[in-house]
Image (spheres, rainbow, N blue to C red):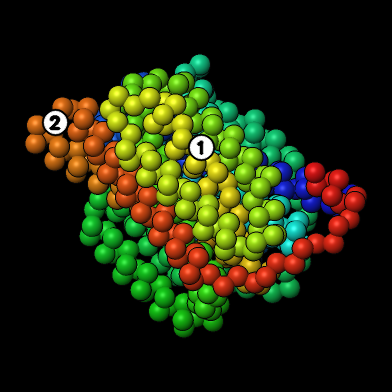
Amino acid sequence: MTDLKSRWLALYVLCLGDLMIVLDQSIVNVALPSIQEDLGFSQSALAWVVNAYLLTFGGFLLLSGRLGDLLGNRRVFLGGVTFFTIASVACGLAPTSEFLVVGRAVQGLGGAAVSAVALALIMGLFSDPGERAKAMGVFGFVMSGGGAVGVLLGGVLTGLFSWHWIFLVNVPIGIAVWLAARRALPADAAIEQRGRIDVLGAVLVTGALMLSVYGIVSSTWWLLGASAALVLAFVLWESRTAEPLVPLRLFRLRNLVVAQGVGILWAAAMFAWFFLAALYLQQVLGYGALEVGLAFLPTSVVMAYCSLQVSDRLVMRFGIRPPLVVGLGLAAASLALFSRAPVDGNFWVDVLPSMLLLGVGAGIAFNPVLLAAMGDVEPHEAGLASGVVNTSFMMGGALGLAVLVSLSTWRTDALAESGSSALEALNGGFQLAFAAGAVAALLAAVAGGVLLRPKPLAAPEPVADEESCAA
């Protein structure tokens, strides 16, 4: 019983640490106008408050996952929390725009370390299929619901206090997570052969990921070509070196590869939904920062309930594929509903139904995606596989956001040139982007349903003490 309690305590510590990281991917969206006014950002430079974080976060996930396997996942997790917390202080007290952007880049480094190993640590803590499904439901809410919680918290903190607090709130949380992790997380197992870090492989893949994120967010296509060239060089090097950063045999694991594809498509839809929905509420319906945050509350509540109370039960009863397909299908329906939201939209009719559907869909689907991705991986490579999975979600989110925002801008410009009012043109752009996001989520559902071949999950033997502790 004590062992079970300690494992669940460790899970909550890991989830709180990862939630802090996930929040920072969306918490700044609502606060950007206030940040721009206070620090004098130009309109083009303002995007770097988001992009600097995405750039280093996406670029260092794989290296962080490999470091977890070589140095110990607990050690890398604690180091990442430390980096992130210190950088949060710098961001919250930033006196200039340049200082804030640098602080956000350092936050991305810490965030990559935490996210890359958290999933591996959870897989190591829970080996029983039933416990693992329940634990993944908790972690799934953090990963999928963190975006909605971030918009909610960003709106509340900015509306009631100031934008500085969207960063400073991380400081007490980070300190608490670091102290709790030292006590709750199991010590790293002794690694008989630590091996060497594949320095050239790390440089090639990190450079490729950073160039691709930069190329996506800045719409600089030649950088995407350079990134592709580095990826090719990386694959060639990994196939020849004795101790590769990413053993290419990982990509012979069917479920890992399919889950990556599903994750890319879904993250593309989800990142864009959080970003564009906040803009629709602010720029079309005229909501303030606090109102935008509160508008995301239903999504957060429903997503939490479905992740924590429903998803694991569905997985244990029906397996991985059915809840994944249904959840992603509901997410696609949510985006399709938002694609018809009018200029004079009403919250109860045009916004709330979509938010509730997304909460249910994302809450159900994220758990089986993670289980499918990690189910075939050997324990000694769990950190690397965790980094691979997180990289897929991150790159999908960055790519989806860039593509759908570009579609939205193109449609808005076209409508404005044809004589539509500024507000109608803006809303028309949002509608097209939401429709494209719905297609991405639907493709993810189809890919998961057709291509995944997950191992069957055996239900655990009922043990009264364990059930009471888990509850």
Number of other residues with Cα within 10 Å of mark 1, as a class: few under 14, some 14 to 19, many 20 or more: many
Q: Quote the CA–CA distance across marks 1 and 2.
A: 31 Å
Vertical placement of residue 157 versus 301, above or below: above
196 in relation to 1, above or below: below
- In the picture shown, does residue 11 fall above or below 237? above
Residue labelled with disc 2: 420
Q: Residue at x 73, y 73 (%)?
A: 192
Q: Is residue 371 above or below residue 365?
A: below
- Give me the disc on residue 246: none
Q: Is residue 197 left or right of residue 138?
A: left
| Label 2: few (<14), some (14–19) or many (≥20) C-alpha neighbours in 10 Å | some
Work out which quarter of the rendered image holds the C terminus and state it: top right
Which residue carries the number 1 mark? Answer: 356
Residue 165: percent from left, percent from top: 52, 24
Residue at the extreme front: 349
Q: In this image, 160 relative to 13: left or right?
A: left
